[in-house]
Image: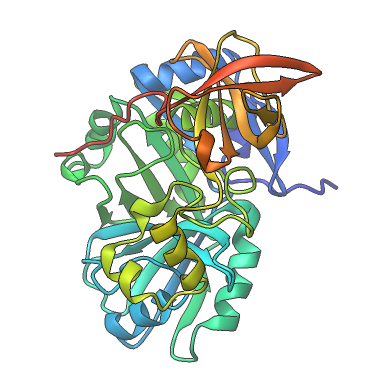
Amino acid sequence: MSAFLFTPLYGLHREYGARFAPFAGYDMPIQYRDGILAEHAHTRAKAGLFDVSHMGQAWLDGPDHTTLAAALETLCAADLLGLAPGRQRYTQWLNAAGGIIDDLMISRPEGADGRLHIVVNAARKAVDYEFLAAHVPASVKLTPRPERALLALQGPLAAGVLARLAPGFDKLPFMGVKAAEELEVSRSGYTGEDGYEISLPAEVAEAFARRLLEPPEVALIGLGARDTLRLEAGLCLYGHELSEEIDPIEAGLTWSIPKRRRVQGGFPGAARIQAALTEGPKRRLVGLKLDGRAPAREGAGIVGPDGAEIGLVTSGGFGPSVGAAIALGYVEPAFAAPGTALALLVRGKSLPASVVALPFHPHAYFRG
């Protein structure tokens, strides 16, 4: 008997020749027959279909929106009181020291006062649910939704593909959410491209995925290309760029904390985060571009001009669209400016690199 969990699309992945590897307790497709480079290029040019059903989906219900939003604002630094129906926010659950317990999406469905929907990371969903159960008031109810699958359709042709099966979603604004029959759709994603995340009942997920795969512009994409795409987009991955020791300012997520919350505080670790906003963080997440094609992986040391270690790589690899080896890592603030010449320690060798502005590859989100 397998120790792994399986998503509702496991049989489809096997049919398409997926290579699997364990991820967050699931046996997940890493790549298909054409390989990671081809899948990456396909998503950038056309539309890639990702199975992300391992993510955690849940409802949070309260007596009304104001009560529910106010309760959750004590756990994160987002503006949830101002979250309009049909919109979603990216935010982070914070611990008492201001470190990141998890990063997530929170959406407010239309026509349901006092209800919010969350999507959390697969490896952290048990932690998240325990955290919420321990900290929300009795008036707030958490309901996990393991019966739902989650698909991500990403790429410049994604809107046209989805509109043929579910008309109207091509008009959805970026970070908008909309439900239609069994589908709950957000216009967002983790590749830097335009696209959607589609929540639907697990029992119909395979049939819907097969319909999405009918046109030649759509291909199944594994977690390998998902990682190269998000790395080029400069997007953080929990367990790499984010952890319970790292705060949002260090991680370059200041944009996710609106002015009201920065000033008022009222969230865990507010003193640390407010100090980082005014005085600067003790470390900064930066983009690094290596001079050669040899990549630096997580844990590689980052050294300054004098040879002293000033940080560590958190994610790294070859960026197919960039055409170069790239990495994310934390460095001391004095070395964070774009153009700063550094070096990365890879298997005993010092590889020249320089700090570059993020993202490595331009975002192409739909702006209406």
Q: Residue most toward the right? A: 1
Q: Is residue 125 above or below residue 339?
A: below
Q: Position of residue 237 (x, y in %)?
A: 56, 43
Residue closest to the eye, 163 or 152: 152
Q: Is residue 194 above or below residue 216?
A: below
Give the residue at x 72% y 22%. 345
Does the image show residue 108?
yes
Q: Is residue 93 left or right of residue 26?
A: left
At 56% from the left edge and 47% from the top edge, which residue is drawn?
283
| Picture residue at 44% right of the left edge, 46% below the top | 252
Front one among 313 and 121: 313
Quadrant of res 256: bottom left
Task: Indicate left or right for 176 with 228 as reference.
Answer: left
Q: Position of residue 214 (x, y in %)?
A: 38, 24
Q: How is the image coloured?
A: rainbow
Q: Residue 314: x, y in percent?
A: 63, 37
Residue at (23% x, 33% y) in the render: 164
Q: Position of residue 358 (x, y in %)?
A: 40, 31
**Quadrant of the rendering where the C terminus is positioned:** top left
| Residue 134 vertical position relative to residue 56 in the rendered view, above or below | below
Q: Quadrant of residue 260?
A: bottom left
Q: Which residue is nearer to you in this view: 143 or 229? A: 229
Could you tell me if residue 105 is visible in this image? Answer: no
Looking at this view, name the residue that lies furthest to the front: 306
